[in-house]
Image: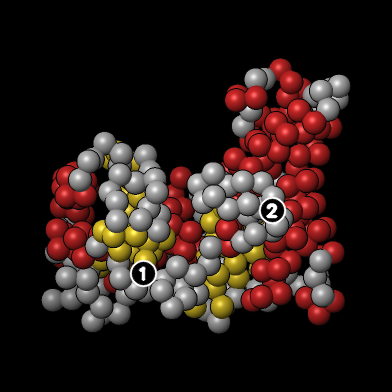
Amino acid sequence: MTVPISQQYAIGIDIGGTNTKFGLVNHRGDISYHGSISTHRHETIEAFIEDLFQAIMPAIEESGGIGVIRGIGIGAPNGNIYKGTIEYAPNLKWKGIIPLASMIGAKFGVQARLTNDANAAAVGEMTYGAAKGMRDFIMITLGTGVGSGIVANGQLIYGHDGFAGELGHNIIIPDGRLHPGTGEHGSLEAYASATGVARTAVEFLERDPSVPSLMRAYASDEIDSRIVYECAMKGDQLAMEVYEFTGRILGLALANFVMFSSPEAIIFFGGMSKAGDLIMKPTREHMEKHLLPIFQNKVKLIFSELKEADAAILGASALVWEMRPAENSL
């Protein structure tokens, strides 16, 4: 007998370089169970999947058994939704191409679907959050890196190979700052991420040692985006200039993205977005400045409505409700 959707659950799994978080989610987006395991301590993918299985099964049994599980959604770095694979993820121990969706689907006995973490966030926002009802928007995650998901005509853009939407690696300043992870120079992520903000602060401090700043109380290797934010909130002029500089680059990038897909909104998520007007005011100013008149004053810049602690799990679980009945990873 088919279980009514009101009694079904999706399992949302968010695989990070350090930890993997998971939860049981109903169709309204309510999370009835949270859990996590270590990602990096597992030398093999088989050991990781076994540990994940042992961690999740008690919650499945308590919720009514595997029959109430509609499917498993997985958000992972370098995830390919077409193939259900993780491909050459630099921050994971398991190298090469890992057919994770089929492996997890076989282990649990239910269908599984996988995409990259930023695309999962966009699906989650469209299903449960600020983008509910929107057909055209861009999701930008401002954290350690800059992730993105692009939705057009109600569909997430994956591209022919499943890897579309890497807006953080667009070159914004030719021959600019080196991105150590990619070897590219001048990418958006090198400037607009939390890591980029910290690097900008250090560069500004070193550029003119005579300029006073609260940030000088910290060694260069201690400065992170949190310290920059706290100093800016105390009125530190140099820290505020860091946000002005970052917003100028982010705004320029967003102007390019708007003229590409003409979204209704750009939705921000991640630790950096908590800086609020410090970064959003210069971002909007410079975005509008670089837009053609037909695009100006049309795009909303808004913040995610998903709780940060739950967003990755919700985004991954949202993949399950999109599954067609015939779609199966087994």
In whole angstroms, how far apart are the C-alphas of marks 2 and 1?
Answer: 33 Å
326 or 283: nearer the eye? 283
The part of the image, by quadrant, that contains residue 174 is bottom right
Please state which amino acid type lies under the numbered disc 2: Asp
159 relative to 103 in the view: left or right: right
Secondary structure beneath dot 2 equals loop
Question: For residue 163, which numbered disc appears in the image?
Answer: none
What amino acid is labelled 1 in the image?
Answer: Ile
Residue at (20, 45) in percent of width and height: 44
User: Where the C terminus falls, by quadrant?
Assistant: bottom left
Q: Residue at x 28, y 60 (%)?
A: 97
Q: Residues within 10 Å of mark 1 (few under 14, many from 20)?
A: many
Residue under label 2: 175
The image quadrant that residue 137 belongs to is bottom right
Judge whether residue 128 can be spotted in this image: no
Question: Which marked residue is nearer to the observer: mark 2 or mark 1?
Answer: 2
Q: Which mark is residue 81?
A: 1
Front in this rendered view, residue 114 or 301: 114
| x and y percentages locating residue 231 in the rendered image | 74, 28
Q: Compare residues 113 and 197 and report the one nearer the observer.
A: 197
Left or right for 293, reference 130? right
Identity of the residue drawn at 78% across and 76% down = 295
Relative to residue 83, is residue 217 drawn left or right?
A: right
Other-residue count near label 2 (Cα within 10 Å), few / some / many at <14 / 14–19 / ≥20: few
In front: 257, or 28? 257
Return the disc, 2 or 1, that comes first in the chain's sequence: 1
